[in-house]
Amino acid sequence: MSQNVGGEEDFVEVRLPAAGAYLSVLRTATAGLAARLDFTLDEIEDLRIAVDEACAILLQQAVPGSVLSCVFKLVGDSLRVTVSAPTTDGRAPERDTFAWTVLSALAGEVDSAVAEDRTVSISLHKKRGAAPGSS
């Protein structure tokens, strides 16, 4: 685990092929890091599902053969997870879909961004002990 110069937050970055076969690696990393922050078993499972769903959304439009990046930032009693991948069309995920509703319910705070190079990112922010659907 790397630590920034200020020592205020720890982060882990995982880069893997943008293919569904590798998502189990991210689910395992998510569970391990959430456990490190003393999340409950239910919170850990919710976050694992949310990361999996965010990746599934990105993989639908990821450039074939590209790399999926996942950055975990541990800040206080919360975990911020940002998954990103280069996409063919650079379209942000629709926020009025069932998948987005599921993400929001499981992770609390959810956001997305599109970079100039058409890399799409989805960020999840889960606080330990937060009620479902709250950040």
Image (cartoon, grey):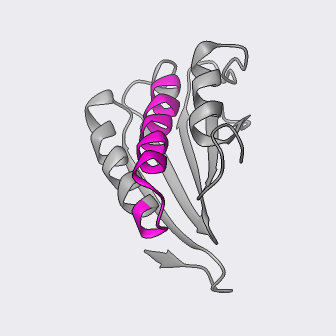
Task: Using the rendered image of the protein, determine whether residue 119 is visible from the camera's viewpoint.
Answer: no
> Does 40 appear in magenta?
yes
| Magenta span dominant secondary structure | helix
Of 123 and 62, nearer the camera is 123
Residue 54 horizontal/vertical position (percent) = 52, 32
For residue 107, above or below residue 93: below
Residue 3 horizontal/vertical position (percent) = 54, 80
Quadrant housing residue 18: top left
For residue 76, above or below residue 129: below
Quadrant housing residue 94: top right
Query: Which residue, as the protein is rendered here, is positioned at the far top?
Result: 97
For residue 76, above or below residue 124: below
Of 5 and 46, nearer the camera is 46
Q: Quadrant of the N terminus?
A: bottom left
Q: Which residues are magenta?
A: 35-57
Residue at figure coordinates x 42%, y 69% from the top left: 36
Q: With 92 as the anchor, is 84 left or right in this view?
A: left
> Does 49 appear in magenta?
yes
Of 92 and 129, nearer the camera is 129
Residue at figure coordinates x 55%, y 40% from the top left: 84
Residue 133 horizontal/vertical position (percent) = 67, 37
Query: How many numbered circles does the render carry?
Result: 0
Quadrant housing residue 114: top right
Task: Using the rendered image of the protein, determine whether residue 71 is visible from the camera's viewpoint.
Answer: yes
Q: With 29 as the anchor, is 53 left or right in this view?
A: right
Of 102 and 83, nearer the camera is 102
Residue at figure coordinates x 66%, y 42% from the top left: 108
Residue at figure coordinates x 57%, y 19% from the top left: 99
Residue 122 horizontal/vertical position (percent) = 62, 37
